[in-house]
Amino acid sequence: MDTVGFFRELGPGQTEIYAESIQVHLGVGPLPDAAHVIQYLREGHTLIDVMGAERDVLGSDRYLVGGASIMTDGQWLWRDDLSFYLASYQVRLPQEFLDAVRANGYRVPELRIEELRRLSREAMRILGYHRPPAPSP
């Protein structure tokens, strides 16, 4: 699975997946099809539902309920708050992700429950939510 929008400022510490700063993705201007991409992000399948509210790391007083929840389209993983950062700050997204969204006609593919379960396990592995137990001495 590929990942998009896991910025350092959003992460639980300096982990590999949260390595890049959101600051690097600012100042590029709006996408011509931003409304469609934002809707795509909002309509992703929820793989990991995270309770709580995340503060906007770019300075507004907004709190994003469930912002750390993990979404997917079957190929890409993103946080639920990525749509907010795209809508509010026009963060730059990887061209490969935009190509995939456009190739899907801005519609998140339907996925069977078995596939969603498999993707959920893979997302937890990628994000480091579950680590294998350490071997016994």
Image (cartoon, rainbow, N blue to C red):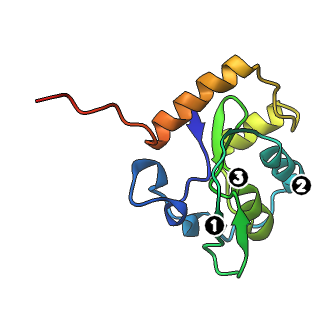
Q: Residue at x 40, y 53 (%)?
A: 15
Residue 54's disc number? 1
For label 1, the crowd category at 10 Å Cα-Cα, with few meaning under 14, some 14 to 19 and many 20 or more, is: some
| Quarter-of-image position of residue 19 | bottom left
Q: Residue at x 55, y 35 (%)?
A: 123
User: In the rendered structure, which amino acid carries the disc numbered 1?
Assistant: Glu
Residue 31 on image: x %, y %: 81, 57
Distance between mark 2 and mark 1 Cα atoms: 23 Å
- Judge from the rendering whether residue 122 lies leftward or rightward of residue 13; answer left or right: right
Which secondary structure lies at badge 1? Answer: strand
Count of number-bearing discs? 3
Q: From the image, which quarter does the N terminus lie in?
A: top right
- Judge from the rendering whether residue 44 lies leftward or rightward of residue 136; answer left or right: right
Q: Earlier in the sequence, mark 2 or mark 1?
A: 2
Front position among marks 2 and 3? 3
Q: Earlier in the sequence, mark 1 or mark 3?
A: 1
Q: Which residue is mark 3?
A: 80
Which secondary structure lies at badge 3? Answer: loop
Q: Report the front residue among 126 and 95.
A: 126
Residue 10 on image: x %, y %: 55, 62
Q: Which residue is mark 2?
A: 35
Q: Report the front residue among 98 and 58.
A: 58
